[in-house]
Amino acid sequence: MILFVLFPVLIPNLSAHLYHTKTGSTNRNLTPFEHFIDQLLLTPDSLKSALVDSFFNQLTQAPIVENDTTVHFVYRGSGNSVTIAGDANDWNPDTWPMLHVPPTNFWYYTTHFEADARLEYKFVKNGNNWLLDPLNPYTCLGGFGPNSELRMAQYVPPPEIKYNPAIPHGSLSDTTFYCSYLNQSRPISIYTPPDYVNSEELYGVVLLHDGPDYLALANARNVFDYLISQAKTPPLIAVFVPALKRTDEYAGALQADFSAFIVDTLMTWLDQRYRTLKSPQYRCVAGASNGGNIALWLGVTHPEIFGKIAAFSSNVEENIQSVLKADPKRDLKFYLDIGTYDLPVLIPRVNALKTILQEKGYTYKFQEIHEGHSWGNWKAHLDDALIYLFSEITGVKSGMRLDIPQDFELCQNFPNPFNPVTEIRFQIPQPTLVTLEVFNVMGEKISSLADQLMPAGRYTLKFDGTELASGVYFYHLNAGMFYDIKKCLLLK
């Protein structure tokens, strides 16, 4: 980051700046904010407050972003000092003092960020009063409450984190587990995709550490709904696991016991209770910060359970690096990211992990994101990880099972009778030229639902009878040497 401050030294009467302004700065190309500052400093003290009032009356939003990469933080209020603490200075309020223009109550600070950066911050008044920016409408909820959110000119807010009433929504259920390894009980939340209860399909699994935070702070339920509705990922089951002794469980003395609970208790129960795909290529373990550390540890030590790992702004303890360096390459796929303004201790750890993955020939995606160590960052990139990790199966239709059937089968449509839409399910055990057609009682073809070469799998296709009259219809499946007919009833 390149730091630029209009006045590197705070001079109470600003005489040095006034001299510079009078002797040449007016010849340079000023931005609107710089022009205002020059005007303000040249204005007599008795009129300065009126000029500040006029400026704020015209100001619609702050911070002020100019030329895509320049940002001006502005504040108006009394106080002995006003500073800025945020992602960009590791939340240290002593490093960014705002400049005061006496005798007004106006303060400002200028710096530069990347054009697509998103950063969180607060004002700190008199050294101990932490304030949201009263002129900034954007806030982001984090683990310690809301922060003001700086959005630079090219930052694009993520659409997937918002609740969309126009798309199908999955369901969330809660249960409680007793963990014999840790002698404790903990709540677990399970997300099932839309139409789970009406199907017989099998689903991939995503297990997220710091589960309650992923639900409350990362809007993960909305993210899964969005990705599934847009066919960016296959339908997935998500498991949200909380930490009780977070540091010890994720990166300390309880890591082995916590890992055993996940592998032996939770995943075993999940496979018995839900229709899951048990191959590790359909299972992802994910987390952020220390949650990323336990996600990495579970993946590298239990590749027979989890074949995909997502680690956001992750801690990477030495035991993870040691296992990856010493052991043969595992069948794993990784997503890693780190913020430009992340915790300083984490940046070299993530980069070292990236180097190991590259040297060992792992499949991985790495992103450096112009943000900080925050849920505002992680919730906006959960979709990046899931789309990448499940990229080999994103072309699968919403209703297709991802295991390979043993026989041809045409199922009875559901619902039946129907009005006006029903689903027709079928399965094929090998790549086959498939035609699925609908006929009326006169033997006339009224719809062709499929006519193409299709890979082995289980499929669900929709039949829409909106334009048809009530009555009996027949659907025919031709798949190689297999042929079957079933009857359905449309009732309006």
Image (cartoon, rainbow, N blue to C red):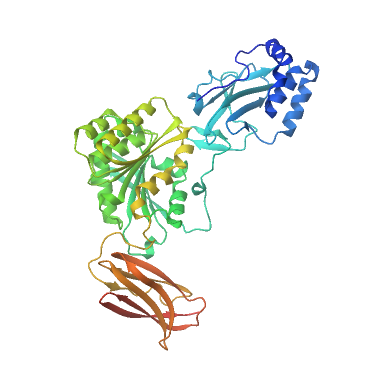
From the viewer's perspective, is residue 437 above or below residue 347? Answer: below
Residue 145 vs residue 453: left or right?
right
Coordinates of residue 410 in the picture (x, y in percent): 31, 74
Q: Nearer the viewer, residue 89 or 169?
A: 89
Residue 489 vs residue 403: left or right?
right
From the viewer's perspective, is residue 423 above or below residue 153? Answer: below
Residue 93 vs residue 286: left or right?
right
From where the camera sits, is residue 26 visible?
yes
Residue 374 vs residue 41: left or right?
left
Q: Nearer the viewer, residue 441 or 138?
A: 441
Residue extending furthest toward the front: 27
> Which residue: 32% across, 61% down?
401
Coordinates of residue 462 in the picture (x, y in percent): 42, 70
Coordinates of residue 355 in the picture (x, y in percent): 31, 32
From the viewer's perspective, is residue 167 above or below residue 113? Answer: below
Question: Where, by quadrant of the figure, is residue 29 drawn?
Answer: top right
Residue extending furthest toward the bottom: 442
Question: Where, by quadrant of the figure, is residue 365 drawn?
Answer: top left
From where the camera sits, is residue 180 visible?
no
> Which residue: 39% across, 77% down?
437
Q: Nearer the viewer, residue 434 or 132?
A: 434
